[in-house]
Amino acid sequence: MPLTPLDIHNKEFSRGFRGYDEDEVNEFLDQVIKDYEMVIREKKELEEKLNEQKEKLGHFSNIEETLNKSILIAQETAEEVKRNATKEAKLIVKEAEKNSDRIINESLTKARKVAIEIDELKKQSKVFRNRFRMLIQAQLEMLDTDDWDELMELNKEVKVPQLDADID
């Protein structure tokens, strides 16, 4: 057990023949007591400061641990958000590809229908032109033949006045 300043103060030395000077020993002991008290006070202050620093260190260690956990959670969350965004982007791209394929197929189908309709209209136009040509040729032939003249004679004989009026 360490000595206390009181132990030093109360220490009694035995006296011998021609012993130490009592006043010198007492002065020295008083000086030792003061220095020892000062060392003890400094030790207590340093221990208190050390305890405070340990508490602060523990507090900061807890904060550091909490921050590290928060950083890890934030990193994991960021990775999860990134994965989800990538999945969503892939889904959007797939949906867009499906829509584009559908639109292309619909356009191709409509284009085929229009092409078929055009071909059909061309055929109808050709048939119509041929019939019209044949009608015109028949009419021209009728005009070029003598039958027309005979028809006119026949009309005069029958006396169809409207026909004469239209011809003149």
Image (spheres, rainbow, N blue to C red):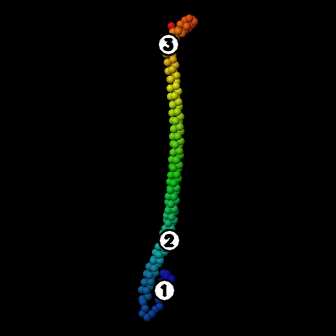
Residue 45, how many percent across, how many down? 48, 73
Where residue 154 appears, as percent x and y from the top left, is 55, 7
In space, the residues marked 1 and 2 are separated at their CA atoms by 33 Å
36 and 60: which is toward the camera: 60
- Please report whichever mark, 1 or 2, sits nearer to the chain's N-terminal start: 1
Residue that numbered label 1 is attached to: 11
In the image, residue 7 sits, relative to residue 64, either above or below, namely below
Q: Is any atom of residue 153 visible in this view?
A: yes
Amino acid type shown at disc 3: Thr
Q: Which residue is mark 2?
A: 51
Residue 100 location, x and y as percent? 51, 42
CA neighbours of label 2 inside 10 A, class few (<14), some (14 to 19), many (20+): few
Residue that numbered label 3 is attached to: 145
Q: Dot 2: what SS?
A: helix
Q: Residue at x 53, y 7 (%)?
A: 153
Task: Pick the residue in front: 110 or 32.
Answer: 110
